Amino acid sequence: MAESVVDIIKGILKCLVLVVYYWIVAILKAILPTNMQAKDVSGETVLITGAGSGIGRLMAVRFAKLKCRLVLWDVNQKGNEETLSMCREYGVTAKAYKIDLCDRDDVFNVANKVKEEVGQIDILVNNAGIVTGKKFLDCSDTMIQKTMEVNTMAHFWTVKSFLPDMIKRNHGHIVNIASSAGLVGVTGLADYCASKFAAVGFDESLRFELESLGKDGIYTTVVCPFFINTGMFEGAKTRFPLLLPIVEPEYAANKVVDAVLCNQAMLLIPRILYFFFAIKGFLPTSCLHVISKHLCINNCMDDFKGRQSKLD
Ligand SMILES: NC(=O)c1ccc[n+]([C@@H]2O[C@H](COP(=O)([O-])OP(=O)(O)OC[C@H]3O[C@@H](n4cnc5c(N)ncnc54)[C@H](O)[C@@H]3O)[C@@H](O)[C@H]2O)c1
C-alpha cells in the first residue's frame, strides 16, 4: 500500500531529527578526550596485516601496550619477527605468520591455521599496502594486479575468513587502512587510488550491511591518511607542509588505535582532510582542479622513489 503524505512528512522529520542528533554526538565525540570514551580491549586478539614495518608495526606495539594478544601477518618474515619481539616485551602473547596477501589460497590457509592455533579474532586490521608510484601507462601489469590484490582483494579474503565468527558472537572490529588517495584522484597514483577507493567503498558497504543485520557489536573503521613518513612514499612531497603536513608514523598509528577504541567509523589524517573531503562533495570538478593544482596534488609524486620494492 502507498504511504500517505502524513507518513512521508513524519518520515522526513524523523530522519532530520536523527541527522541533527548524530551530528551533535559526532561533534562531542571529536571534542571529548579519547580516554573518556575508549573501550577496554585488554585480552582481545588483534590481527594486523603488514605488521613487519611502518604503521603496522607501531599499531601492533600500541595494542601490545593495551594488553591485547597479537597475530602478526607479513610477507617480510624478518621485519615481522622484529615486531613480534617488540610486542612480547610488553608480556603479551603474540604470534607471527609469513603470508603473501596476493595469494587468496594462502590467506585462507593461514587464516585457518590462526583459528586452530590462536582462536577467534576480535580486531582485524587490514593494513598491508603497496604502491607502484608511476603514471598509469608506465605501471607494469604485474604491479597493477599486485596493488589491487594487496590493497583491496586481500581485505575481502581476510574479512571472509574472520567476519562469520564475529557475526556469531556479535562482537568485533574491522579496520581498513585506505588512504586520502581513496577519496581523491592523484596523478601518478591511478592504480593505487583505484585500490584505495575500493577499500573505502568496501568498508562503507560492510558497515551498512552489518547494521542491516542488526550486528551492533561489530564496528568498522576506515582510515584515510595523507602521506606518512614511513618510507613507503619516499620522495613524495607536499607544497604547504603547514597546511597539509606529511604525517609522522607514530601519530598516525596512535590515531588509528584511538579510533578503534572510540568505535570511530571514519578517520582522516590530518584533520584538514575533513574540510577537503567536504568541499569535494559540492564544488564542481573544475574548481577542484584549480585547488588541486594550487596545492600541487598533481605534482606531489614527481620525485617519488618509494621503497625501491622488489615486488615488481
Ligand atoms: N606511507 C604513507 O604515506 C601512506 C599514506 C596513506 C596510506 N598508507 C597506507 O597505510 C598502510 C601502511 O603503510 P606503511 O606506510 O606503514 O607502509 P610499509 O611499507 O611500511 O608497510 C606495509 C607492510 O605491508 C607488507 N606487505 C606488502 N605486500 C605484502 C603482501 N603481499 N603480503 C603480506 N604483506 C605485505 C610489507 O612487507 C610491509 O611490512 C598501507 O595500506 C598504505 O597504503 C600509507
Image (cartoon, rainbow, N blue to C red):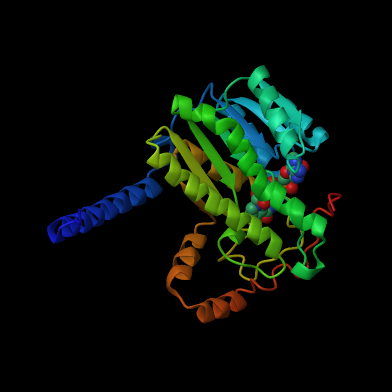
Q: As rendered, which of 215 and 301 lies closer to the eye?
A: 215
Single out the residue that lies furthest toward the left.
Answer: 6
173 over 297 or under it: above or below: above
296 over 25 or under it: above or below: below
For the point 62% across and 55% down, the residue is: 196
204 over 180 or under it: above or below: above
**Quadrant of residue 281 within the rendered picture:** bottom left
Q: As rendered, which of 1 and 102 lies closer to the eye?
A: 1
Q: Is residue 9 visible?
A: yes
Question: In this rendering, would 277 be left or right of 241?
Answer: left
215 over 202 or under it: above or below: above
For the point 59% across and 30% down, the residue is: 46
**Quadrant of residue 128 within the rendered picture:** top right
Q: Position of residue 67 (x, y in %)?
A: 57, 24
For the point 44% across and 65% down, the residue is: 278
Q: Position of residue 141 (x, y in %)?
A: 80, 59
Single out the residue that lies furthest toward the front.
Answer: 1
Q: As rendered, which of 92 and 105 lies closer to the eye?
A: 105
Q: Is residue 228 visible?
A: no
Give the total of numbered labels.
0
